[in-house]
Amino acid sequence: MARRRQNGEGTIYQRPNGLWVCEITIGYTEDKKRIKKTVSSMNLDKLKKKINDLKYLNDRKMLDAPDNIKLSEWLDFWLETYKKGQVKPTTYDMYYGVVSRHINPNLGHYELNKINQIILQQTINKIAAGGMSTSYLKQIKITLTQAFKKAIEVNKIYKNPCDGLVIPQKPPRERTAFTVDEQERFLAECCNPKSTYHNMFIFAFNTGMRLGEIQALTWDDLIDGDTAVSIGKTLIMVREYDEQAEKRQKTIIGSSAKTDSSKRTVPLNKKAKFAVFNQRENNDKDSPFIFYSLVGTPVQKRNIYREFGKIKNNANISSDVTFHSMRHSFATRLIEKGADIKTVSELLGHKSIQITLDIYGHVSSDLKNKTISLLD
């Protein structure tokens, strides 16, 4: 059998079937016998990557007693080595949050190679029973799948326990819109033209934009003499982590968070134009953002939610409406007034008209029933 050695990389050779194999010494027993680890790959570059991974693990004594490696230890290594700086900050923030808040508290104490599909399924079911959304459960599954996949690549485990893992399905959450009366009462409280929050709420009701899109709006997004707004970016807050796992907030403004269809132009009605006019007249910070904080930066989400809650209480609105309900109210009012679903879908920036129908089909049905009743 022919051997091909690579300097400083252990004994690497290629078998007749083309498989590259490397034998690495990872330590010695008490009687001075070598402890060997063998890795293989059909691709030489991938084999070298596995060798480097093994050396990293061995240097941190994660190969001395592989049966004792906890999932939490592996996830910390996986995040630091394979994800930090390798994926978008928002993606890393998702992985880190899922691991620290849900995976480690529920599964971190298990030994890596002792976790099986039954353990994972029982854990997912328990988290789901606690009220976790389906989308977040999917994030947990994605994170675990990726971490176990890498563990297989470096010969820590031999099968991905996420294979066959089922996410418990929940009924779709009902979208809550303001009633006409609630909307009028809320807007009646937005009477201060110098208030960024009041102007923002008026603008949201009349454009149907997502919160991140409104936060990211700058003056150069206005077109045709402030008669329309070009929507193509969003604001996202992510956490950054240093070596001591201390976190700090970072603002990222990038392309629209959803899809290419999120990039759209929305005409401004008189009320939306008035909100923009008030912001321009009172822009004492010379901020590039239309809706800005006291120091000219984008308004933070927690402050927006706080002001929203105050106005909601002042308007004596007890229903379960949120800031996002303004977007649903925008669409609902348009459909109630006879707008066609396709136009509403384009204004909202939905990927397809079917998404709009799934969300607002009941509104359209109610309108049809009321129209037919005119014949009674």
Image: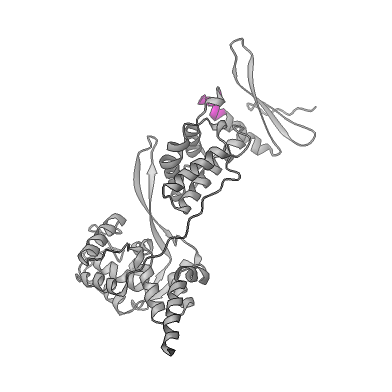
Q: Kindly identify the residue that appears in the image at 49 percent across and 34 percent down.
A: 77
Q: Is residue 360 among what the camera can see? A: yes
Residue 235 appears at what percent x and percent y?
38, 58
The part of the chain drawn in magenta is: 55-63
Camera-side residue of 174 and 325: 174
Residue 371 appears at what percent x and percent y?
43, 85
Residue 231, above or below 113 = below
Of all residues, the one furthest to the bottom in this rendering is 375
Residue 210, above or below 188 = above
Camera-side residue of 5 and 66: 66
Camera-side residue of 285 and 73: 73
Q: Is residue 85 among what the camera can see? A: no
Magenta run includes residue 153: no
- For residue 325, side relative to residue 353 (left or right): left
Colour convention: one colour
Of all residues, the one furthest to the top in this rendering is 31
Magenta run includes residue 61: yes
- For residue 296, side relative to residue 244 (left or right): left
Residue 227, above or below 62 = below
Q: Kindly identify the residue that appears in the image at 69 percent across and 39 percent down.
A: 43
Q: Kindly identify the residue that appears in the image at 22 percent across and 61 percent down.
A: 310
Residue 144 appears at what percent x and percent y?
52, 42
Residue 297 appears at what percent x and percent y?
29, 58
- For residue 105, side relative to residue 269 (left or right): right
